[in-house]
Image (cartoon, rainbow, N blue to C red):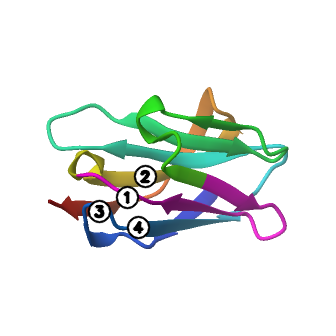
Amino acid sequence: QVQLMESGGGLVQAGGSLTLSCAASGSIFSPNTMGWYRQAPGKQRELVATISTGGTTKYADSVKGRFTLSRDNAKNTVSLQMISVEPEDTAVYFCCFGLNRWRLEYWGQGTQVTVSS
């Protein structure tokens, strides 16, 4: 089993910035992919960004140019830097971990991000 610990959510004004972090522990396997999905009220969970151990990234079109995902393979952590946030970014953000971006088996509890206008 892999456990994911998320941190960094909160309330931020539109146009501001926020960083989310996630640390994986337990039976870590490599290579792997980590990243973030989000779910807004009344909507389906959607991709934000993922990154492989090799550094290959995948971003949702809605966050390209505003969000940057990075990882530290030695520490099994990922960080999502969010700038120029918009009210539409308001959601619960979930950290994920898996073999690749099509097989994300483990999920965190979620952290709330609220962007005020």
Q: Can you give x and y, in whole percent of width and height, for residue 84 in the image?
A: 38, 57
Q: Give the range drawn in magenta.
A: 69-86
Residue 33, quarter of picture? top right
Look at label 1 and name its amino acid.
Gly
> Which residue: 48% across, 33% down?
60
Residue labelled with disc 3: 112
Q: Can you give x and y, in whole percent of width and height, for residue 27 in the image?
A: 74, 58
Residue labelled with disc 1: 110
Q: Which of 79 and 7 is in front in this view?
A: 79
Residue labelled with disc 4: 17
Circle 3 crowding by C-alpha within 10 Å: few under 14, some 14–19, many from 20: some
Q: Which of 50 and 116 is in front in this view?
A: 116
In the picture as drawn, the residue positioned furthest to the top comes out as 102
Residue 41, quarter of picture? top left
Q: State the mark number for residue 94.
A: 2
* Secondary structure category for the residue under label 3: strand
* Whether residue 96 can be seen here: no
Quick check: marks 3 and 4 in contact, CB under 8 Å? no
Look at label 2 and name its amino acid.
Phe
Quick check: marks 1 and 2 in contact, CB under 8 Å? yes
> Which residue: 84% across, 67% down?
74
Q: Can you give x and y, in whole percent of width and height, for residue 19 in the image?
A: 48, 68
Label whose residue precedes the other's in the sequence (3 or 2): 2
Looking at the figure, which quarter contains the C terminus?
bottom left
Look at label 4 and name its amino acid.
Ser
